[in-house]
Image (spheres, rainbow, N blue to C red):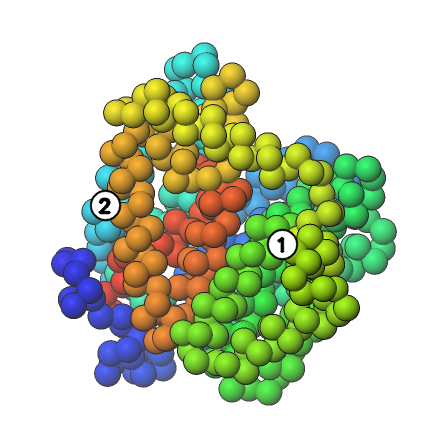
Amino acid sequence: MSLSQENITFPSLAPEAGKQRAAASAWYLDFVAWTVALAVIGYPLAGLISSYLAVSDSSISIAFHLFVVFLSAAVFVVNGVRFGLRPLDTSFVIFYLWYLGRLIWDTGRADQPDADLALLIMVGTTIIPLIGVLVPRVEWDERNLAKCMFAVGAAISVLSIVLYRLGLSVDDAESLGRLEFEKLNPITLGHTAATTILTAVIGWQYWKSHFWRLASLVPVACAASILFLAASRGPLIAFGICFSFYSIAKKQWILLAIMVGSLLVVVNSAPIFDGETLFERIRISGIQPEDSASLRITFMTTAWEEFLDNPLFGSGYSLPVVGGYPHNVIVEAAMALGIGGLVLLLSLFGRAMFKAWPAIRGEHALSAILFVQYFVATEVSGSLWGDAPVVIFMVRLLSPVERAPR
């Protein structure tokens, strides 16, 4: 299949799309949509349940991920047999086989601890769900996807606020006033809340029913509260970029005015040109340890230095001495794979971003805007082995599904 822009046709924009939607299953029976929703933002459900039940180990999280793996495999088998299979984007396959090879190689190295765990996480949370929903030649129904994503996000948002009001959130010196739970950190909560709000905003163009529109108001209010209470910079920045991106692409100037107006209301009397006061008022700064950002910059700098020392083949999947990841997947690709991996990943992100703009203006706005959100997330707190959302939506944009009846 040619990957040039001229030869790519989004299936739901074709004349047959209306018939395909009519033949599609109801949203609550669309297992492709449920698989995507659970793989992308479902994990916080397991974290909240673990926190509520005071389960200290990872048993509930492991059970959740095994369920998603089973669901992905079932979707792959059923749809693969029924509709056949299709190839994924060639550049993506090359890059991730290359990176999988790096993880496998690093499992035998003493200076690269936990490479086997990173490999297991990547295969279980990213590769298997990706294959399950994108390799079978079957079209995603974005209307169903919007409802399933919102249903999962709404459950997490409402439950988080309920547990917070019950006093079950973490309340100690380390939390520094940010919303978090024993098994759920502020960054994950913030991104889940941002996804919930963005899904609701985009879903309104699909949801003609007054029930869905009214029912979305309470979860959106809960999600907005979480975004504020979690006070994590990454999700706040990603949400602002995506909301602006969507408003401009769709020429929804009222939405953009609402966001700007809401920001001004929150800021209230803070001097607009006093940057530090402004950021503290909207909880972008002054709410978490001052060394948080500097520590991540140190990680990124260390990873980049490793790349400069090993530019051809990379040095390893994790940071030297201290271990862990650089919190930036582009720098991580350079460190792990060298110049070839860096160029390949940049080309993948660049092509996906190029396709995101027309997709947002068309009928694939949800996939495109969530790719933008999680792309931003990977640049401030992401890892190549643990970022299923950006991978799933990137491949969705790069490898549009061929037309096939549902």
Q: Is residue 102 visible?
A: no
How far is disc 1 from disc 2 in space, using C-alphas? 31 Å
Q: Position of residue 259 (x, y in %)?
A: 60, 73
User: Label 2 is placed on what type of residue?
Assistant: Ser
Q: Quadrant of the N terminus?
A: bottom left
The residue located at (74%, 50%) in the rendering is 179
Q: Is residue 236 visible?
A: yes
The residue located at (57%, 46%) in the rendering is 64
| Relative height, residue 75 to residue 204 (above, below) | above
The residue located at (60%, 87%) in the rendering is 210
Q: Residues within 10 Å of mark 2 (few under 14, many from 20)?
A: some
Q: Residues within 10 Å of mark 1 (few under 14, many from 20)?
A: many
In the rendered image, which residue does mark 2 sit on? 91
Q: Nearer the viewer, residue 85 or 90?
A: 90
N-terminal of the two: label 1 or label 2? 2
Q: Nearer the viewer, residue 222 or 229?
A: 229
Q: Is residue 396 left or right of residue 148?
A: left
Residue 236: which disc?
Answer: none
| Helix, strand or loop for disc 2 | helix
Q: Position of residue 100 (x, y in %)?
A: 34, 32
| Relative height, residue 329 to residue 355 (above, below) | above
User: Label 1 is placed on what type of residue?
Assistant: Gly
In the picture as drawn, the residue positioned furthest to the top comes out as 110
The residue located at (55%, 86%) in the rendering is 209
| Helix, strand or loop for disc 1 | helix
Q: Quadrant of the C terminus?
A: bottom left
Q: Quadrant of residue 119?
A: top left
Residue 190: which disc?
Answer: 1
Q: Position of residue 248 (x, y in %)?
A: 44, 74
